[in-house]
Image (spheres, rainbow, N blue to C red):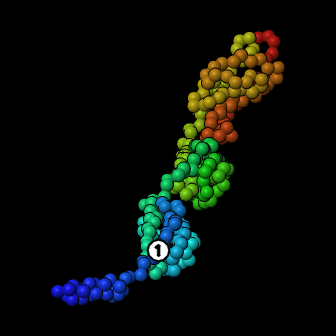
Amino acid sequence: MKRFVFLSLSILATLILVPSCVTVQAPVGTLPVIGTFVSNPSTVNSGATSTLLWNVTGATSVTLDQGIGQVDVAGTRVVGPTQSTVYTISATNSAGTVTRSATIIINSAPPIGTPPVIIQFSTNPSTTNSGGTSTLSWNVTGATSVSIDQGIGQVNAAGTGVVSLAKSTIYTLSATNSAGTVSRSAVITVSSAPPVRTPPVILEFSSNLNSDNTSTLSWNVTGADQVSIDQGIGIVNAVGTKLVSPATATVYTLSATYAIGNSTNDIGTITRSVTVRASVSGTP
């Protein structure tokens, strides 16, 4: 019995003193650290660009997706996505791989901004005769391009231009910048040719000898704008009489004038004359 106990104790001691045969795994190590990975700006308009910025420590390999590939452990990259995109950075070493993502959002439309302002677009005169002229005047602020139709084309932001017209015409000014285009129109009306007026009618222009050896001029005119008699008499009514006593035989001429058109130069005149004999003393 004592022998068995001794052998058991010997075996136990041997097991304690002999190293274990179990394999212990080596420590995992430290994963890379992604200190920074951002997009700046994170929201852009369509067609604009953004910058990716990153800083990684403890990595043996750093990559960016979306077709970029291997990059340095720290750096920047300008990207211009056409739609909202998530970019992912991957940092790897013997301990494993870590990732981080950054999103760039694309606005569906750029901000509207401020359109140009048309301060003035006018015509002077606004009505003219066929073949006449008018002056266009304009003043625009905030535009990168200003134009007028009807064959005028590109113009400065402020200015004037003389146009000649054969018919009524609408002119449209367009002012453009990145926010869009604004327009304003101005009309020049061409008057039709004035109707041809019927000349005045001198119904009567005569002289009558009086008993006192003077003479009386008598007249009757229709359709005239003005009636006048020479020999110092001047402007008279369309119907009237005038006592005259010339020292010598004298011709008196009545003039009836009228406006043919709109211009003060478009004047028509018709005349008629009578002769008055000289006044003498005594009984005629």
Q: Does residue 196 sit above or below 209 in this rendering?
A: below
State the image coordinates of residue 44 (x, y, percent, origin top left).
Answer: 49, 61
Q: Residue at x 43, y 73 (%)?
A: 98
Q: Quadrant of the N terminus?
A: bottom left
State the image coordinates of residue 26 (x, y, percent, origin top left).
Answer: 41, 81
In this view of the protein, can residue 169 be seen by the observer?
no
State the image coordinates of residue 4 (x, y, percent, origin top left).
Answer: 20, 88
In this view of the protein, can residue 239 be seen by the observer?
yes
**For the image shown, how many numbered marks are present on the structure?**
1
Amino acid at dot 1: Thr
Q: Does residue 117 sit above or below 17 in this rendering?
A: above
Q: Does residue 266 sit above or below 223 in this rendering?
A: below
The residue positioned farthest toward the front in the image shown:
2
Q: Quadrant of residue 209?
A: top right
Q: Quadrant of the C terminus?
A: top right
The residue wearing badge 1 is 30
State the image coordinates of residue 55 (x, y, percent, origin top left).
Answer: 54, 69
Q: Residue at x 51, y 66 (%)?
A: 35
The residue positioned farthest toward the left in the image shown:
1
Viewer-nearest residue: 203 or 196: 196
> Pointer 1: residues within 10 angstroms few (<14), some, or many (20+)?
few
Q: Secondary structure at mark 1?
A: loop
Q: Residue at x 60, y 27 (%)?
A: 221
Viewer-nearest residue: 81 or 58: 58
Q: Residue at x 45, y 76 (%)?
A: 29
Q: Does residue 235 sit above or below 161 in this rendering?
A: above
Left or right? Give the position of 83 relative to 78: left
Viewer-nearest residue: 169 or 252: 169
